[in-house]
Amino acid sequence: MWWKLFFLLLYFSMLFILARFCEAIVWYETGIFATQLVDPVTLSFKKLKTILECRGLGYSGLAEKRDVRELVENSGELMQGELYSALKNEKEQVGSDSSTTFSGEMHFYELVEDTKDGIWLVQVIAQDRNPLLSTANWGKMVQKVSQFGIRTGIFNCSSDSRYCHKRGWMKSTLIMSVPQTNASKGKVMLKEYNGRRIETEHIFKWMTAHVASRIKTIRFSEQLMDDWYQMEKQPVKMFLFARLLQPPAFFSALSIKFTGRIEFIFVDVRNWDNTSCLEEIGVQQMPSYILKTPEGIYRYGNSTGEFISLHAMDAFLRSVQPEVNDLFILSLVMVNLMAWMDLFITQGATIKRFVVLISTLGTYNSLLIISWLPILGFLQLPYLDNFYEYSLKLLRYTDTTTIASWVRADWTFYSSHPALFLSTYLAHGLLIDYFEKKRRCSNEDQNANNLEWLSSLWDWYTSYLVHPIASFQNFESDWDDDPNFLLQRLAFPDLWLRPLVPIDYIKNLPTWKFRLAQSERLNPVECDNLQKTMTNPNGGSSGDQEVHHYSSEVLHNNDGCSAATKSKESWSGGGEQDTDWSHWPCGMLHCTECVVCLENFETDCLVMGLPCGHVFHQQCIMVWLAGGRHCCPVCRQHATEQLEPE
């Protein structure tokens, strides 16, 4: 998990460097920055209207370019990045229609009347009547209001005529829902459009007037000074000082979105003669967007990415005064980006990568939700109010720095260009995959194909169902030897309750070949073979396990090499007197029969002894111990006692 977090932070660092590199390229080619101011005089009449559309200011009565330019200047400074975003959004919104069609009363109530922090514009079509706005005009209206976070919908009374009679909607009209109070989750009021003119500009002006009425407006200097130094429960306030009749639509829309968190105040300074009070509180120019916090004042618009638009100011205010839902969404994005790193870190077959990815996504998201439940409970405790306030204070100090403004600008840029974000993430993942392959070049499993990995996965799954403990320790299950083993295992109540015991002690148990004494000499070839057998009784490499081998051979010649085999006929005469016990490990009991399989030890068979002294076939006792029974089959003494400190 820590490696995934490291790779994710490395990816964010690469995005930050890439954004600075792109800014340098743009500056080199054009000689301008995104934060460079634009003179409205140099813009065309169409571009000026586009800026006013994005800021939410009406220009229906302004026919000359000079009046439109003055309105742009009075609403705020224009930057190159804001102009680029406005022109880009205008192209993307052409032909887009995101209206909701309501099916009845309950659907309308859930989305419109029960929504406490949003604005709705609904076109009501009376039964057997034509709509108030035509399809073309309604599409223009949707494009105009959607950029301010205003949702739209259509309610056809033919789907629920009873509800229309109840509301008094006997003719086609427009309904706007706005929160009635400034309290969080307050009541919603429905406003009906009663104007005679049905142009989009007049309808939009009617909407912005109703929304702006919710914002506290200050028109006198004495009232400003009283409000500025007044100590209230809401410590964070957003002031707009401008020479406008009413605040822009984006400012009014943000006041509804941040209801209960930030108080929005509009200061109309058109008729002010005395500006000394403005200089006293730090307002140097008009217009000014001032954020007042307990830590001081912050002038919005001086840093990177702080444009006079809805999305830019929304990102700024969310970082300064976030709510729990914002932090949860941020953590959800971070956790899922970390989980997707498994697709590149995991080596091997393609199906294996996606299986691991799905497992990681489910695990991480489940742990995230489980972790947030106690956090939400703690935040509701009254004893943590001071901790919550100090956390917000630290967050405000951090988010008003220059680096924080760069991060917000990059977030806005990459979120508006998802193709660039996904391509860079894929490139970063491929680099991780390349270096992981180099680091794990000795791993044989990475070259396995899909069928081989699925086969191994199925073998492990069946082994886990039959024998859960042994499957985790890479031992063969008893299922291979006895197909009826599953029925036998179900008869034991401790099927899933056996503790996980380390099995490293098995490789330290003494293992040797069982041999019988013989008086015949061996030829030199057999002597050499016997010496090789004594060196490695298994006849080959033993892999990573180092096993102690012993031999029960009797040396009858001067060369120190003789056979210890016994023919079948020697067993009929008693047999034990022909067995040489001199080379058995110390403490091992002398026996010629395995009590696990009830078979006699044959010549050259591998036997293994336990700390208690009982001896068995190596294969029989390995299956017994690997099955989770870490004791002797005869005396039930623990086989791990030799590892315990004395």
Image: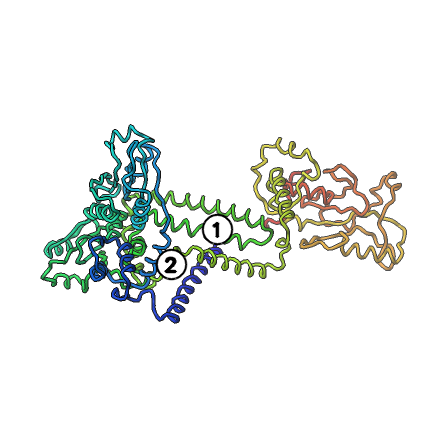
Spatial separation of the CA atoms under disc 2 and disc 1: 24 Å
Amino acid type at circle 1 is: Ala
Q: Which residue is mark 1?
A: 339
Q: What residue sits 30% from the left and 62% below the top?
A: 401
Locate residue 91: give its quadrant. Answer: bottom left
Tell me: residue 571, above or below residue 341.
Answer: above
- Check the image and name the residue furthest to the top: 162
Q: Nearer the viewer, residue 269 or 530?
A: 269
* Residue 260 visible in the picture: no
Tell me: residue 53, above or below residue 468.
Answer: below
Amino acid type at circle 2 is: Phe
Residue 646 image point, x, y percent? 59, 50
**Element at badge 2?**
helix
Residue 387 image point, x, y percent? 29, 51
**Element at badge 1?**
helix
Q: Which mark is residue 646?
A: none
Q: Nearer the viewer, mark 2 or mark 1?
A: 2
Circle 2 packing at 10 Å, graded few (<14), some (14-19), many (20+), is: some
Q: Which mark is residue 413?
A: 2
Q: Nearer the viewer, residue 8 or 96?
A: 96
* Residue 90 visible in the picture: yes
Q: What residue sits 73% from the left and 55% below the top?
A: 541
Q: Earlier in the sequence, mark 2 or mark 1?
A: 1
Residue 81 image point, x, y percent? 33, 62
Q: Nearer the viewer, residue 618 or 271?
A: 271
Locate residue 480: give its quadrant. Answer: top right
Residue 145 image point, x, y percent? 29, 48
Say whether residue 131 is left or right of residue 334. Answer: left
Q: What residue sits 25% from the left and 46% below the top?
A: 199
Locate residue 191: give its quadrant. Answer: top left
